[in-house]
Amino acid sequence: MNPLYGLIASRAKHRCEYCHAPEVIFNFPFEVEHIIPLALDGSSHGSNLALSCRSCNLYKSSHINGVDPETQRKVRLFNPRNDEWSEHFMVNTETAEIIGLTENGRTTVLQLKMNKPSQLAARKQWMLLELFP
Ligand SMILES: [Zn+2]
């Protein structure tokens, strides 16, 4: 486990910093993710680390950019250290979908596959438990 896990998880209030999944209902700690990957010279300092659920980390992989589905422009992904979540995303509490409000938000929702069926099904359960949004 990343030695900074405790600090990063506490700072993130034990939620995935991308999709806001609540860590408390998982049976394994969330992952400490490099926002700018080490392969792209990102650092292992706390300013480049985010708490991420397995799904977001898997699909983010080494990506820092993606293609905005609306404009087809290449834009950077949401950066949990520099960006405010609520400025880039909102939750549709009827469908459990995460809606991108900006080009960065839309691109991140798409790249990280935040609205795939298994995500929506899980989110609906978290809502029933009042752990989401
Ligand atoms: Zn996530």
Image: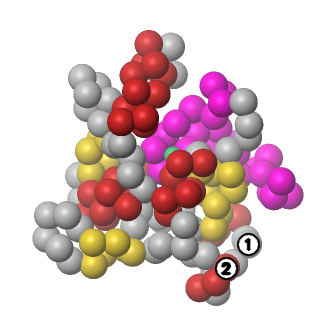
Q: Which residue is mark 1?
A: 44
Magenta stretch holds residue 114:
no
Disc 1 marks a residue whose amino acid type is Ser
Q: Is residue 68 visible?
A: yes
Q: Is residue 17 visible?
A: no
Seen from the viewer's position, the closer of residues 114 and 33 is: 114
Q: Secondary structure at mark 1?
A: loop
Q: Position of residue 74 (x, y in %)?
A: 27, 78
Outermost residue toward the front in this view = 117
Magenta stretch holds residue 23:
yes
Q: Earlier in the sequence, mark 1 or mark 2?
A: 2
Query: Is ligand 1 less than 8 Å from the beta carbon at label 1?
Result: no
- Asked whether the residues under the numbered discs 1 and 2 touch, taking CB atoms below 8 Å apart as contact, a structural biologist would say yes
Q: CA distance from mark 1 to mark 2?
A: 8 Å
Quarter of the image with the N terminus in it: bottom right
Residue occupying image coordinates x 64% and y 61% = 33
Residue 38's mark?
A: 2
* Residue range corresponding to the magenta coloring: 1-26
Specify whether 93 is left or right of 35. left
Seen from the viewer's position, the closer of residues 122 and 78 is: 122
Specify whether 103 is left or right of 60. left
Query: Is ligand 1 less than 8 Å from the beta carbon at label 2?
Result: no
Crowding at mark 1 (Cα within 10 Å: few <14, some 14-19, many 20+): some
Residue occupying image coordinates x 13% and y 70% = 71
Q: Position of residue 21 (x, y in %)?
A: 52, 36
Specify whether 13 is left or right of 78. right
Outermost residue toward the left in this view = 71
